[in-house]
Image (cartoon, grey):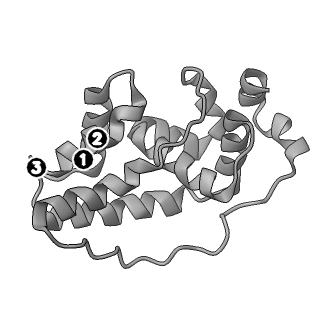
Amino acid sequence: MGYSFWEIVGRAKEEAGDDWESRPDTLKSLLMKLPPEEICRFDLDYHKKLIEAYRWDLWGAAYLINGGCSDDGFDYFRDFLISEGREVYEAALKNPDSLAELDDLEDAELESYRYVIYEAYEELTGKEMPFADIDYPDDPAGESWEEDDLEKMFPKLAAKYE
């Protein structure tokens, strides 16, 4: 299996089927088929996607979907968002209100999705995976919001989740 970040994510989603909470286990089994250096590359690409989605507007969408969203909760929401695949991820970056098109979500967080990357590497090599050499921004990109602004910012999400 050749390396393609979104192909691996898409296969994990497809193989997990309707049970999105089983995506981490499916991702892990797919990663275990890769050479260790490709798992490291996947991890680096994964962190780049986390940073790309570290934005105030997406945090607002997560806040509406999950009925509130702490900073850890926003990390885990972005794990879920990545697990949805390229099409959903990129649509959400263009317009977070597009997430209203997904089936009703409850606790759209998938914390273990990122951890299975390390687990796959360690099980494959017997060694701890080196951390991706990447700088995280201190604050999300874009304009911060007030809770009262979210309904106007994301009318579809507000109608669905409030």
Tell me if 135 is positioned left or right of 70 in this view: left
Q: Residue at x 60, y 35 (%)?
A: 107
Q: Position of residue 27 (x, y in %)?
A: 27, 43
Instruction: Work out whether 21 lies above or below 8.
Output: above
Asked if disc 1 and disc 2 are in contact, CB closer than 8 Å, the reply is: yes
Q: Position of residue 90 (x, y in %)?
A: 48, 43
Viewer can see residue 55: yes
Q: Quadrant of residue 128?
A: bottom left
Instruction: Work out whether 54 lies above or below 92.
Output: below
Viewer can see residue 7: no
Q: Earlier in the sequence, mark 3 or mark 1?
A: 1
Tell me if mark 2 has few (under 14), some (14-19) or many (20+) residues whose alpha carbon lies within 10 angstroms of its own: some
As measured in the structure, the alpha-carbon distance from the residue carrying label 1 to the one carrying label 2 is 5 Å
Tell me if mark 1 has few (under 14), some (14-19) or many (20+) residues whose alpha carbon lies within 10 angstroms of its own: many
Viewer-proximal residue, 160 or 110?
110
Kind of residue at badge 3:
Lys
Q: Quadrant of the C terminus?
A: top right
Kind of residue at badge 1:
Lys
Residue occupied by mark 1: 28
Q: Residue at x 51, y 63 (%)?
A: 51
Residue occupied by mark 2: 25
Q: Residue at x 28, y 51 (%)?
A: 5
Residue 33's disc is: 3
SS at circle 2: helix
As measured in the structure, the alpha-carbon distance from the residue carrying label 3 to the one carrying label 1 is 9 Å
Q: Quadrant of residue 122?
A: bottom left
Residue 116's disc is: none
